[in-house]
Amino acid sequence: MSSWSISPSGVQAVLADVQVSAGELGTAAGGLETGHEELSGGVGDLLVGVANAVLGLIESEATTLTSVVNRIESCGTGAAEATIAYVAGDEEMAANAQSAAVTAAAEAPALASEQSAAGIPPVSTPGVPR
């Protein structure tokens, strides 16, 4: 890759979508336990084993679901921080380039005088009047 092209507003939009989806996943995971309670209350003695098996599955996957939600949040935070650093770097590079241009413009007359004294002909730039 020879260059970066990051749209901070695009990153923000994607992160907002991810945050909504992560919230929905967290809500769904939280609703599984409620679903078990409803399932247990609505089944007869014959299906209590099924309800308990479902509860066991929910409990065994709760840590995994929590981990997934935490990773989604961490990735979003990392992407936001990387975008902030990118924008700050762009601003710093622009400020450095502007400063270098001002310095070069200020030093140009002295350099031209030194070159003339040394017998070095001036450099002409096509389309730029002298």
Image (cartoon, rainbow, N blue to C red):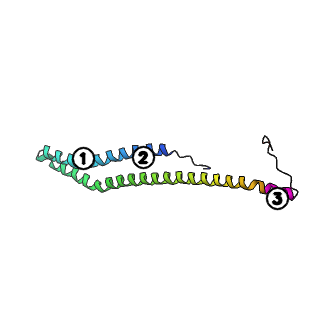
Asked if the stretch drawn in magenta spans residue 78, the answer is: no
Q: Which residues are magenta?
A: 111-121
Closer to the eye: label 3 or 1: 3
Closer to the eye: label 1 or 2: 2
Q: Which mark is residue 15?
A: 2
Q: Which mark is residue 83?
A: none
Q: Quadrant of residue 104?
A: bottom right
Q: Which mark is residue 114?
A: 3
Our reading of the magenta stretch's main secondary structure is: helix
Q: Quadrant of residue 130?
A: top right
Q: Residue at x 25, y 52 (%)?
A: 58
Q: Say which element carries label 3.
A: helix
Closer to the eye: label 2 or 3: 3
Q: Which residue is outermost to the top?
A: 127
Q: Please indicate whether residue 75 sits to the left or right of residue 58 in the image.
A: right
Q: Which residue is outermost to the right?
A: 119
Q: Residue at x 28, y 47 (%)?
A: 27
Residue 66 x/y as whole percent: 32, 54
